[in-house]
Image (cartoon, rainbow, N blue to C red):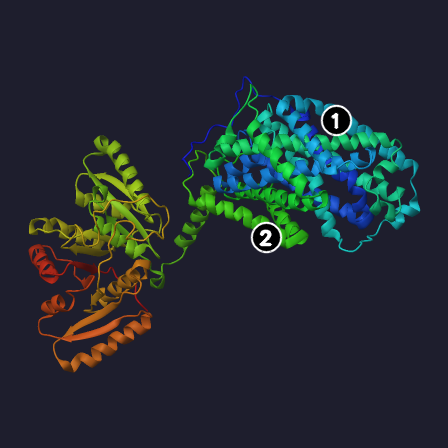
Amino acid sequence: MDGDPKPISNRGDSATANAFGTFEGVFTPCVLTILGVIMFLRFGYVVGQAGVIATVGIVLASKLITVLTALSLSAIATNTRVEGGGAYFLISRSLGPEFGGAIGVVFFAAQALSVAMYVIGFTEALMPLLPAGINETLIATLTNAAVFACVMIGAGWTLRIQFFILAAVVLSLVSFFVGGAAQWDLSTLRSNLDSGYTDGENFWTLFALFFPAVTGIMAGANMSGELANPARSIPRGTLAAIVVTATVYLAMAVFIAAARPRDALIGNTLVIADIAIMATLITAGVFAATLSSAMGSMMGAPRIMQSLARDGLFGWLRPLAARSGRAAEPRRAILLTFAISEAGILLADLDSIAPLITMAFLVTYGLINLATFYEAITKNPSYRPKFRYCHPATSLVGALGCVAVMLLIDWRWAMVAVMLVAGLHAYLSRIELNTDWGHIQSGLLFERTRQNLMRLEDEMYHPKNWRPFVLALSGTGFSRLYLVVMGHWLTAQSGILTLGQIVPGELADRGGRRRAQEEILHAMIRQRGLSAFPSVIVAPDYISGVEALVQSQGLGRLRPNMVLLGCPLSADRMEVFAGLLRNLNGLGKSVMILRQSDADGAIETSTAQGPASKANSKTDQESGWQIPAGTIDVWWRGRANGELMVLLSHLILQHPDWRGRKMRLMRVVENAAGVAEVRGHLQDLLAGARINAEVRVVISASPILTIHDESRQAAITVLGFEIPEPGSEAEFFERIEHSAGPLSRVAFVHSAGEMNLE
């Protein structure tokens, strides 16, 4: 992460932070944002184009999405202590910092552009009252500056003046409904029931134009840092605002359609003022609503940005985390919001901004619904919302509804919005995020893993599905790195690798050391980019520790099926080692003994490590591992161990750094008479197993010397072995040493017989 900034708590100082209740902190901002510029300047146009029936459908569809989202929002808000940042805070704490950071940037930009939309709407309403010749962009810029100045004073002052704005909006609505009742004409209403779309308009273009009107449900959540009790105020205030404003819009659609013919509705943006009994009250309502909505967005957007910056997800945003004054105002973020809104004023108009904002809000709403859905279905014990009226089905429908509406409105802009969020998510996934909050993805993975483990437990294990689950004894601090490397090559593409370590002693004395060694092992796994799990246990001695690890590792049927060991280099150690081999065989585990005569430098190098990487695709050379030159030679002596030897060699060659290398399947015969038969048998075996290898049959009366001669340039020589009987340990040691001889790297394999190539 840039500069590795540490996240800062988003919670304001309790002694100085604002503490607003449900009505002034959530309900009023939501209502004033919803009953804004679209209602006064574009709703008549929507009714004229779509007709009453389709307009009711647009309003209900929009409200359905916002209701479902509000239910999800309420569930999350009552499941955690809500701090500053509104939707960003809730999404990041549920779906994780990657999704939270991506949506935080997009939602901030949408809120900042909303300021421009509301200011442009205010200017449109103001221009007819001003002398001709005055530049409209100049008036919009001056208005934007005035909104900026009000918000810079502080949220407390801004939220309190909204009561006067609410009074103006209520009076304007009373004026409209009284005027509409006086001019009610049933025949006009009938003529406006059906749609009358002009060129370029349809249900979805009008939906896109209207939808920003209902996005005000976030106005209260965005002020979460200023609420005394966010978990109580956000659900109550948001849902109440949705119900009230839905009633207003549905009633207005009928009154508008009954008061003016279609042409007047389409051609006159101030048709509501013409219908009202006092046009001046409508003008005052337009001014009040648009300015209030602009101020609401100008207050909400900086708090999203401030919260995002304080979490430290983007190092270059850190300066915007600063708080100013006793109320911890985000003044730097307010300045950035002003700059973006001014750019929107200079470069766009109301009709072009609205669809863009629609996409950004729909993406945000979709993720809020998705977060709630995942919280519920993962059955996380920590998911205990006090709000009881949200079901996983409603959250899923809300998420799918957002996606469907985005595609129906404009699939191209929908793809742009999704790709933007995906790109930001990918960027945040690649950097080292330092966050101290939990998120739902771990719970989702846990639930999926739990279900898969239960399914695996109920199904018989089939040899066809055999995968290497390797337990490699890595030693303290990767002291046996060549075993770690071999385990990585065997499992990187299709298996599971556990790196085991034994701490000798008694658990009462070594518990702290065990935890410390496991942390060290985990850190080294991360540093080298391994796909592996650490496992450290305390045991009286090495042998009993290995046996305990083998028996305790895994869960259900997902347990190690192969143990990777180093080869003892002295006969006196072989007696104990052979006993371990017999016990592992009794436990049904395959064994690979890796004997490496140049263990200090052939597979591993002592070069200093570069920066840590999380990517599994990181090459072994970058990790300080050297791929040995040559082929992989598998010496066949029969199916007992041979099939596993071939498969393991094939798996090594599937590793990206081994591709292009070859396997040689080899066998020694005593005379030429058996060459053709043996070659044909081995070729049929490879063909049936669908494995590419070169078959080589060598005639010799001295198999060991032949192996030494033929495989002297091999990268790895693979030989089978049989478990030694009690009392034959010295002979077994001599046989191992004699078989390996001068070869640099020999893998001795014993198969437990649970897989076959065909």
What is the secondary structure assignment of the residue under circle 1? Answer: helix
Where does residue 453 sit, x and y in percent of width and height?
Answer: 41, 50
Q: Is residue 732 left or right of residue 372?
A: left
Where does residue 153 sit, x and y in percent of width and height?
Answer: 63, 22
User: Depth check: 241 or 590 in front?
Assistant: 241
Q: Residue drawn at (59%, 23%), measured in percent from left and top?
A: 228
Image quadrant in which you'd find residue 548: top left
User: Depth check: 9 or 309 in front?
Assistant: 309
Amino acid bearing label 1: Ile
Residue bearing mark 1: 165
Residue bearing mark 2: 415
Kindly tell me whether residue 390 is visible in this rendering: no
Q: Residue drawn at (62%, 51%), measured in percent from left and top?
A: 413
Most extreme residue toward the bottom is 673
Query: How many numbered marks have been drawn onto this rendered protein structure?
Result: 2
Q: Residue drawn at (66%, 44%), measured in percent from left and top?
A: 358
Image quadrant in which you'd find residue 478: top left
**From what the image shows, is residue 642 above or below residue 167?**
below
User: Depth check: 57 or 213 in front?
Assistant: 213
User: Depth check: 40 or 572 in front?
Assistant: 40
